[in-house]
Image: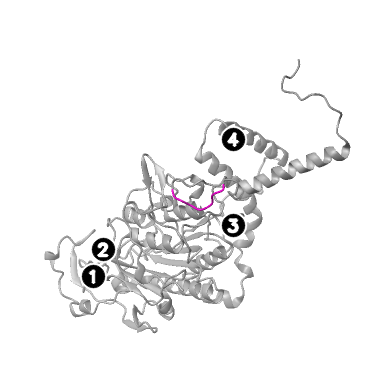
Amino acid sequence: MLNTFSKPESSPPSRRSFLWECGGGLGGVALAAMLDQDGKLSGERTLLGADALAPRSPLASRLPHQAARATNVIQIFCPGGMSHVDTWDYKPELERQHGKPFDPELGKQTFAGIGGNYAKSHWPFRQHGECGRWLSDLFPRLAGHVDDLAFVYSMQSKSALHGPAMFMANSGFIRPGFPSMGAWVTYGLGSESENLPAFVVLPDPRGLPPGGLANWGAGFLPAVHQGTVIETAANRPAIADLFPPADRAVSSDAEREGRAFLRSLNVEHASHRSDSLLEARIASYELAARLQLSAPDAVNLEGESAATRTPYELDDPDVGPFGRQCLLARRLVERGVRFVQIFCGAENTSSKKIRPNWDSHEDIVRDHGYWGRVLDTGASALLADLKSRGLLESTLVICTSEFGRQPFMQGSQKGRDHNPGVFTAWLAGGGIRGGSSHGTSDDLGWQAAENPSYSYDLHATSLHLLGLDHERLSFYHNGIARRLTDVHGHVIQPIIEASV
């Protein structure tokens, strides 16, 4: 049958012409693919929010809204509720009120018990650095970095429960199912590395934090933006199931045929409708193939010099696991990972006497004494390591908890109860004005007093330093242009270094 769309017959091309046309055509296809992957065919790479023309690759690097002070983030999260009055927030009035009963007229004060007597910090506070910032003796090594730190003393949470407060600190909402800050950052900026995940999570070796996987989920954003977990319990950190088991029964030929069949099904499915989960799964498989080559080097700490390894105290049974997380975080941002989240503590599932996180209801001296040394060693080594390599200027380091603890003891026990009314977070690097502070708690450390701040403000500030406008970074979902900061949030200008 005559093909009505065929061209008139002509003499066959010469061999030289045939090769030229084929080669030029393949080169054009390759060039088009590379340009499309980088988003250059769209003619628009600047992120404008929900209406931005996204590049074909969801993790391709994107330009920010404005000049960025930081390109990477390392967030240290201390689950359980760190006691601000025993760590960062010096309260002379609390020392004067020590031993006196809590005044019930101040309102409902506890989460899990009856308010006991006011109790001063269990560790002395001293002034450090040129800024003269007060820190407790729980952090002798971090005290040496105080001129690089900015403290927000007026943080608050909307929940006294670990799970909801964790969700709020990570996603801006007390309910699960909303995208985490790491997911929003990679949605906005993409990845700096083609061979490593854009968002990596390093859970405590003891287990997952309160709330589990939802703390680094992508929510309604494309699933490719959720965090990739690297297990750090072993001496050699690893990504679970990255390599097939050595005793697998499937032959290489059968596996190859199975992948080809799976690909044909995926192509058929994708041709009929857009599926974020399928696209994320395909992207994860492609990344996994590259990770098999790049990940072993990225997580191999043995190549680090003794001078680098020593401050992290990797061989110490208590401090070493967190030190390994911190050293790995530095290696990851050094290799282009956009957002690294470290958890210093796990869920309350351990049967040991010491709490597996900062939730010090029974004995704050025992629990904070243990975790204080862990955080002090790893975080101070990380800051020094980043600074010595010139990475601190471009890496925003955040240390926070989901809420604080009460300025009085929990009934007759030796611990403190949850306090969502105020807690402290600190930041360093990436455009932060070292030695600065924002907000205050009241004289006893009971509630935020001056410039109360929520996760919205911390998130807005972090995005601002990354060059993203928190009011423009949005995603249309269920009829609403959703934001990390919801309808709230202000950039905390006093802790940002003045532009040159």
Of all residues, the one furthest to the left in this rendering is 105
Residue type, label 3: Ser
Mark 2 vs mark 3: in front? 3
Residue 25 in the image, given as x and y percentages of width and height: 75, 41
Q: Are marks 2 and 1 in contact (CB under 8 Å)?
A: yes
Task: Tell me where residue 428 sits by quadrant.
Answer: bottom left
Q: Which mark is residue 193?
A: 3
Eye-nearest disc, 1 or 4:
4
Mark 2 packing: few (<14 Cα in 10 Å), some, or many (20+)? many
Residue 266: give its label: 4
Task: Tell me the distance, in whole angstroms, between the alpha carbons under discs 3 and 1.
Answer: 45 Å
Gap between marks 2 and 4 measured at Cα: 49 Å
| Circle number at residue 407 | 1
Taking 319 as reference, is 57 left or right? Answer: right
Going by the image, does 18 lie left or right of 150?
right
Crowding around mark 3 (Cα neighbors within 10 Å: few <14, some 14 to 19, many 20+) is: some
Three-letter code for the amino acid on which mark 4 is drawn? Asn
What is the three-letter code of the residue carrying label 1? Pro
